Image (spheres, rainbow, N blue to C red):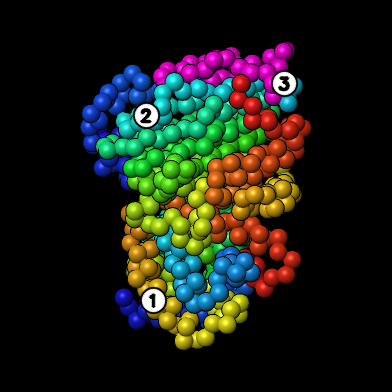
Amino acid sequence: MSDAATLESLRLADSFLPVGTYSVSYGLEQFVQDDRIEDADDLEALLATYLRRQVGPADLVALRAAHAAAREGDLDALCAADRRLRAVTLAAEFRESAQQSGDRLLSLQTDLRDDPLLADYADRVAADESPGNYAVVLGAATGLAGVDEREACLLCCHGFVTGLLGAAQRLLSLGHTDAQRILDALGAVMTEAVEDSADRTIDDMTPFAPLVDVLAADHERAERRLFAS
Amino acid sequence: MAADAPHPAFEGYATEAVPQAAVGSPGKDGVLELTFAATADGTRLVHDYATVPFHVSGTLGHDPHPEADTVFVQSPTGGVAQGDRHDVTVAVGEDAVAHVSTQSSTKVQTMTCNYAAADTALRVEAGGHLDYVPEPTILHADARYLQDLAVDLAPGATAVVADVVVPGRLARGERFEFERYLSRVRATGPHGLLFEDATHLTPAESDPTAPGVLGEYTVYGTAFVLAPDRDAADLSDALHAVVSDGPARAGATALPNGAGVAVRALGDRAETVQSTLHAAWDHARRDLIDAPAPSGRKY
C-alpha cells in the first residue's frame, strides 16, 4: 500500500474519527444492565460473538462488496450491498446506529475527498435510495483510498471492537489495561471473521445472534440509557 | 446424483448417495400445494395437491375469524429422512384469510449421508391474510437440514409466519447433537426484498450456547408479523409489551423496509417459546384482521 493509503487506514481506524462511536453500544448496555456482563472475560466472550456472528457474516461481506464496487466505480453494486445489509439487520436499533455513523463518515469523506462516486452515492443516500450503512461507507472509502480489502476488513473489526470497549469503559469498571488485553486477545477472532466473509456473496449474509436481538429489543424501550443502541 | 444443494455448506452432503430410496423417488420428494380463495361463503381451499409424506384431510372451520379457512398438514411418516426434498406452495387469493399449520412436530431424523431440505413458497394477494405457523422442528442427532421459506406479499396483504426449532429430543437429554441446520426466511413485496433472516447452526464447529447467540437457552423461535402497510413502530412496541413478561426471554423489533415486526423468543422448552409466540400472534391477529389467534386445537 502507498503511504497515503496507510495513513488513510490509520485515520479511519482511529477512535478520534468523528463518527459518533461514543453513542453506540450495539446492545452492550443492555447486557450490562441484565448482569450478563460483569467482568472483562464476559465482555471478551460477547465481543467474540459479535465478530463471529454479526461482523464476519454480514458487515464484512457488505464491506467487501462495497470495496470492490468502489474500485470498479459501480454505484449500483455499492447500493445493492448497502440495501442487502439493511435487509438482514433485523434489530431496529442496530440499523439506526449503522446508518447514523455511516452518514457521519460519508459526509466527512465527501468533505475531505473530491470523488464523483462518493458524491453520487451520497446523493442516493440523501434521496433515501440507499441506507448508507457504516460498513458500506467504510468499504467505499477504503476502496477509493487504495487500502487493501483485507486490511479494510481488519480495520472495520478493530474499529468495531475499540468502539465497544470504549462503551464498556463507561458501563463497567474496566481498566485501560484490561481493554487493551481484550483488544489484543480478539485478534485471532478478527482474523476468523475476515476469513469467514471472504467467500460470501451479498446474497449469503447470515448474521445470527438471537439473544443480542432480544436484548436490543429491551434496550429500544429502556427508560434510562447512555447509548443510542 | 447431481450436486443440487441450494447452499454451498450443503454441497458436500449432496454428493453422498442415499442407500435407501434415492433422492427424488416417490416418498422422498413430497409436494404440497394449497390455494385458498375468497368466495361468497368465506375463504375456501380451491386447490390442493399432496404427495407422500404430505397428507391433507380437508379443511377445518373453527377459526375465530368468520371468513377464515384452516388446513392442518399431516404426515403418515415418522419424520424427515436423509435425501428428502420437500416442496411446499401456499397461495392465498385476494381478500382470503387462511391458516396453515402442521398436525405435529416435524422430526428431522438422524442422518449418515446426504441431507434433507424443504422449500416453502408463500404468496398472499391483495387484502389477503395468511397465518403460517407450523409446529416446531425437532433436530435429532446428526441431522442435516436446510429449510428455505419465501413469502411474497401483494399490496395490502398481511401474514404471520412463525418457526420454532428444538435442537434435539430434549426429554432424553439430546441437545445440539445435530450436524447442521440452516433455515432462511425471505420476504418480498411489490418493491422487492423486504428482509432476510437466517439461522445457521453447526454445534460442533461453533458453540450455539455462546453469549449473545442462544446463551443459556435451548429452544429458539421467531414470529414474523408482516404488514408493510401498517405503522410498524406502534405494533412493535405493543408486541414487545405482550412478550417481554412471558415465560420465554423474548422481544420485538421493527423489521427493515417497513415490513412489519419480528418477535424472537428463547426458552428451555418448546412449550414456553410457543406460548410466547402465540401471545404475540394473538395480539397481531386482532390488530390485523380483528380476530384472535386460533386456540391450537388440531382436529
C-alpha span from label 3 to label 2: 33 Å
Q: Which residue is label 3 attached to?
A: B67
C-alpha span from label 2 to label 1: 44 Å
Seen in the image, is A146 located left or right of residue B273?
Answer: left
- Pick whichever, A93 or B145, lies toward us: B145
- Would residue A124 be visible to someone looking at this image? no
Label of residue A185 in the image: 1
Q: Say whether marks 1 and 3 touch (CB < 8 Å).
A: no
Check disc 1 and give the amino acid type: Ala
> On the same chain: label 3 and label 2?
yes
Q: How many marks?
A: 3
Check disc 2 and give the amino acid type: Arg
To which quarter of the image does residue A67 belong?
bottom left
- Which quarter of the image is occupied by the N terminus of chain A? bottom left
Residue B114 picture location, percent across and down: 28, 36
Q: Which residue is label 2 attached to?
A: B85
- Pick whichever, A129 or B185, lies toward us: B185
- Pick whichever, B138 or B123, lies toward us: B138
- Pick whichever, B119 or A141, lies toward us: B119
Residue B56 belongs to the span the image colors magenta: yes
User: In the current view of this chain or complex, which residue is farthest to the right?
Assistant: B290
* Magenta highlight range: B34-63
* Residue depicted at x 52% and y 47%: B219
What is the chain letter for disc 3? B
Q: Which tag, 3 or 2, sits closer to the chain's start? A: 3
- Is the residue B274 above or below the residue A145 in the image? above
* Residue depicted at x 46% and y 57%: B209
- Which quarter of the image is occupied by the C terminus of chain A? bottom right
| Label 1: element kind | helix
Seen in the image, is B20 located left or right of residue A91?
Answer: left
Check disc 3 and give the amino acid type: Glu
